[in-house]
Image (cartoon, coloured by chain):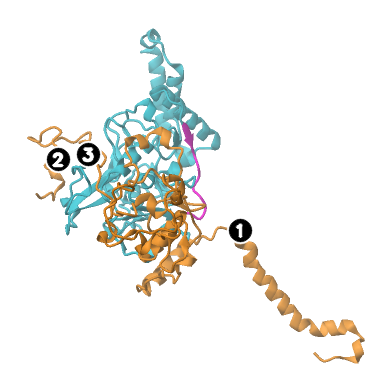
Chain colours: A cyan, B orange
Amino acid sequence: MSARNPGTGKDEAGAEPARGRSSLSRRGLLRGAGWLGAVAALFGGGTALARQAVDTAAVSDSVADLFQKHYKKMSREEMQEAIARIERRAKRDFDVAIHVGNEPPLENVVFGYAISLSRCKGTRRCVEACMAENNTSRDSQIQYIRVLELDHGETNLTNADPYYDGENVPRKGKWYIPIQCQQCENPPCVKACPVQATWKEPDGITVIDYNWCIGCRYCQAACPYWARHFNWNDPKLPADEVNVDTHYLGNRPRRRGVMEKCTFCIQRTRKGRQPACLEACPTGARIFGNLLDPNSDIRYVLENKTVYRLKEDLGTEPKFWYFAD
Amino acid sequence: MQRMDGGRRPLSRYLAALPVALPLMLAVAFAAVPLLAADKPPTQSPEEAESVLKQIMAKRFVVRGVTARGQTLSQAPPFKVVPRIPSLTKYPCTNCHDNSFVDSRVRVLKEEHTDLVFEHGGGRFWCYDACHNGKDMDHLVSLRGTPIDYNQAYILCGQCHFQQAEDFAFGGHGRRAGAWPAPRDVPPTAEHLLVKERGKIAHWKGERVLLSCPACHNAHAPAIRPFQASPVPEVRSGLKRAPGEPEGAGPFSEWEAFSGGKKR
């Protein structure tokens, strides 16, 4: 089923740039612009640059970033170079030696998530853990999880309060629902992206190539769950709070002007660990596992609890369920 | 088979048995194939998983003590629990309790265990009613009188809380080992989120190591108490506080009213 708008995006098959006409392709134009810029920098700003102590590694990294290919099209060597550049940049920006992993999706694994609404007490520990794990900016306070508070009997999420007072939760007469990326099986954000910088991985996680993202925020508008967030500024992180265990498609440090989102902690879950939000939940409301393993926690919940999905009528097929027990 | 010619001509006898023996051998060989292939993880293809779920949903009805797939508690995937005894400060109980003397009078404890609050079951229980055995203080006791190790307290709890016990065994209730502290002992705070705590690892695959019931619930007052939530989210970059909304006034009520349906 394809609900693709013919006016907005090209098809997967049609997106391959025409090899024979490189002078007209996006790559070719970019490359030309890059060389022009380099020449201009040499002649025009050369003296100004020379007066300051130029970090040549930083400049050459920036130039190389400009010519970096899409994640799916990089060879192994190009990928290693890209990762080395990211690690060098993190060293410059935050003075921390990070490790950027590139673990592939696990075989026979599709991730699913469930939250017990009767056990969620609105403690917001998941939000705190998520920020600590995913290196989100402490300055602009990007938070992948919004915990909403509603009155008993209220089910209309537009009447929810995400800024409730956290003194002695759960408060009387209230219930809580955390909302984050639902990892749709049919993700509208992926369809909206004009440059294919975001896609669904084989293990069901929708990821972003932060280097390929142009920051148009179409995906943010397309997402019905408010799960995508835009970096208006360069993320600011204290050095001692940087999580050094990162993934290329996950929690590596981002730049200004790109989107970011929950990736089910791809850097953890692809190694068999649990997402940080689940690990931090003090009441055990969160359940995570492999949808294809009949003995997994998540399959037990799907088979034995009365589960529902948010905005099911949109046909986005979230792999994220809510239940009460 | 009938005996022929006093045991002569053995080859033809074997040949005569071939029509029976060959299918037998083939059947044994095919039966062994799943055993040999048992090394593979027992995962399903997406279509298979979906069809199993649909079948279950189609004939779904609630039976106590049995999952939707008809499994009983003993058929749950194998798990271990984190031992409880190392965190019991007064264990072994026989240091003080003489197993020969049982004082089962309901009273206010004034000398020892003064910190205990008896809220379980609305205060209906006394120590020896269902859980402790005055004759064998170092073990808990089941309703039938068999001793239960303190490390296996979930067996005791599951006698009454059977639905929770089933959820616990199959993965629908509780937390795995390596998670951040439970509210029972330490309400987790921001310090636990920092780098030094990241060495503790909880896994979704591999061996299941679960936290037993008393890790989160105080057996004498099991309800989780309300506690302080993590900080209120900041107003996000790019959004503004509504006019007249005071700085730091707790929950923001008015701003983001543009999102449409906010009614107060």
Q: Is residue B246 left or right of residue A132?
A: left
Within 10 Å of the Cα at label 3, are there few (<14), some (14-19), or many (20+) other Cα atoms? some
Q: Position of residue A315 (x, y in %)?
A: 30, 59
- What is the secondary structure assignment of the residue under circle 3? loop
How many numbered tags mark residues here? 3
Q: Main secondary structure of the magenta part?
A: loop
- What is the secondary structure assignment of the residue under circle 2? loop
Residue at mark 2: chain: B
The residue indicated by pointer 3 is: B232
x 91%, y 85%: residue: B9
Within 10 Å of the Cα at label 2, are there few (<14), some (14-19), or many (20+) other Cα atoms? many
Q: CA distance from mark 1 to mark 2?
A: 56 Å
Q: CA distance from mark 3 to mark 1?
A: 49 Å
Between A219 and A139, which is closer to the camera in this rendering? A139
The residue range painted magenta reads: A99-109
Residue B64 appears anywhere in the view: yes
Q: Amino acid at mark 2?
A: Phe
Q: Amino acid at mark 1?
A: Asp
Q: Position of residue A17 (x, y in %)?
A: 44, 41
Considering only order in the chain, which callout, 2 or 1, is on the residue closer to the N terminus? Answer: 1
The residue indicated by pointer 2 is: B252
Q: Position of residue A50 (x, y in %)?
A: 40, 9
The residue most toward the front is B101
Residue at mark 1: chain: B
